[in-house]
Image (spheres, rainbow, N blue to C red):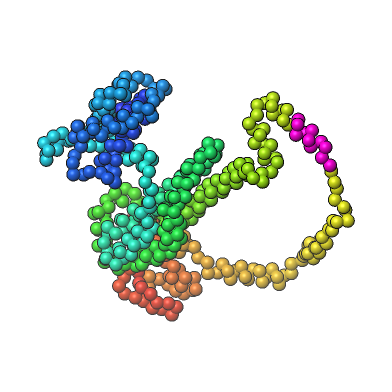
Amino acid sequence: MFFEGDRSNFFRPLNGKRRELVMACLQALYERLHGPAADYVQNLTKEALRNLLCPVIQAAVNEITLNSDTTEDELSTIDLADDQQMANALIRSLVRDGWLETFADRVGLVTAYRFTRPGKLFAEAFWSLNSKRAHSRGRNMRSCRNALESFFKNRDPYDLIDAYEHAEKVICDLSEGIEYFQELGRRVMVQAAQGSWKEFIAFLSRFEQEFKHQLTVDSVERHCTAIKESLHKIRGIESAKARQLEIQLNTIAGWVSQEKQGGDTLDWFLYRIEDLIDAAQSIKQPELTKAMHGYTQRTTNIAQQAHTLRKEIGQPAYALAINQIASLDAGEQDAFLELIGDKLAAAGIRLLDPASFKLHEVSQRKKASLVTDIPIISKEARLNNALLKAEACAFALSNEEIHDALLEALRRQGGQLTLSRLPIGTATDVLKMMQAVEAIRSSREGVLKATRLSSRFKNDYFSGNDYLIEAIL
């Protein structure tokens, strides 16, 4: 559906012989319209657009060449020396293929140009890849934490949506960092062969400005506990306020209905934030650390090797020989190696005095390694082991077992009951009551719902808030 209407040949300008020129012009145009120094007061008229593109075309005369692997097009037949004609042809091409569009500037009473929505998205990608400025992080971990705390205090649904967006950006930030180090690792050998360390210097600068904060003050490990505590407090909001927030969230974030599978919108947001933070902590953060360590370790090894081979003072003889052989032709290499062989043939060989060797005493083996008989396990030992195992498993209840028990209790009670009405005849029943709310909220089936009530209850074992448990139809 993307390649319809004005976008039927959207990528045609980037598939011609002047595609490098087209990309350079798109980057300059995005810098003018949406970059850090963009001028939002004056709209871009055709004359201003032509004046913007002409310097880019002039600068590309010596840098950009025709690509011979593509077919002829409108731009390839125009001489780059005629920058005015090239600029006009480029404007026509970008408007025709859906990159730019015209609109009426009612203030200046002229026709102005701007990016179409898909044109802006792709131009932003080109501009970001070649941008010289550092891509600083938005401190998304701290922003997610602050947004959740603000939502708990003010009950503003926009704060919860902001926290969800920040949690998504945490994954994007970490994923971008992983891809960045993987790309550096793939290019490190090429850079080393060319004797250039520009990318490593750029990495050191970016690490100081960006990754240092991402791994310390903005670390996932540092804020993960506080975020989960905020999520737990939000889940305990009173039922009346929770229903009001549910209505507001359904109005503001209607797109959630297509993402969730049953259940409340508030619970969906809370579980999604928790899942994203857990994924960042257990998967993405270790991958980022591993990718960074792999790149720095590989760079360190190459630097050490280069230092050893290029060291002039005190350089070992074998390193000098290797450097000299590398600069010779095949025949000269054979003659040089034969010369080295003649020199080595006269070398004397001396053996060490055996009396100077002193062997270490063999340490005594462990007694357990000398035991060859299979030990006999007594009846009392088996009984004690069975008792310990039974004690360990006696009070271990899974959320699935508690969930099934609650469903059975709801069938007997007519589909609705309170937490205080659950039976407590055995220790297992007490544990089921204590873990009932947690089991309902952790279930992915979404068939049960626990609503906090204003009343509290107390029995012989514990006291707490009462909850209404009901089945979702």
Question: Image check: 361 left or right of 248?
Answer: right
Query: Percent x, y for residue 180?
Result: 45, 45
Q: Residue furthest front?
A: 313
Is residue 371 in the magenta section?
Answer: no
| Residue bounds of the magenta highlight | 338-348
User: Which quarter shows the N terminus?
Assistant: top left
As rendered, which of 384 and 145 lies closer to the eye? Answer: 145
Against 138, residue 96 (above or below) is above
Name the residue rendered at 42%, 66% in the picture.
436
Name the residue rendered at 74%, 67% in the picture.
377
As rendered, which of 389 and 410 lies closer to the eye? Answer: 389
User: Which quarter shows the C terminus?
Assistant: bottom left
Question: Image check: 262 left or right of 343?
Answer: left
Name the residue rendered at 25%, 24% in the picture.
85
Q: How many marks?
A: 0
As rendered, which of 91 and 456 lies closer to the eye? Answer: 91
Where is residue 325, by image quadrant?
A: top right
Query: Percent x, y for residue 425?
Result: 46, 74
Where is residue 39, by image quadrant?
A: top left
Residue 448 visible here: no
Query: Percent x, y for residue 102?
Result: 19, 33
Question: Image check: 238 left or right of 435?
Answer: left
Name the residue rendered at 80%, 63% in the picture.
363
Is residue 346 in the magenta section?
Answer: yes
Against 456, residue 97 (above or below) is above
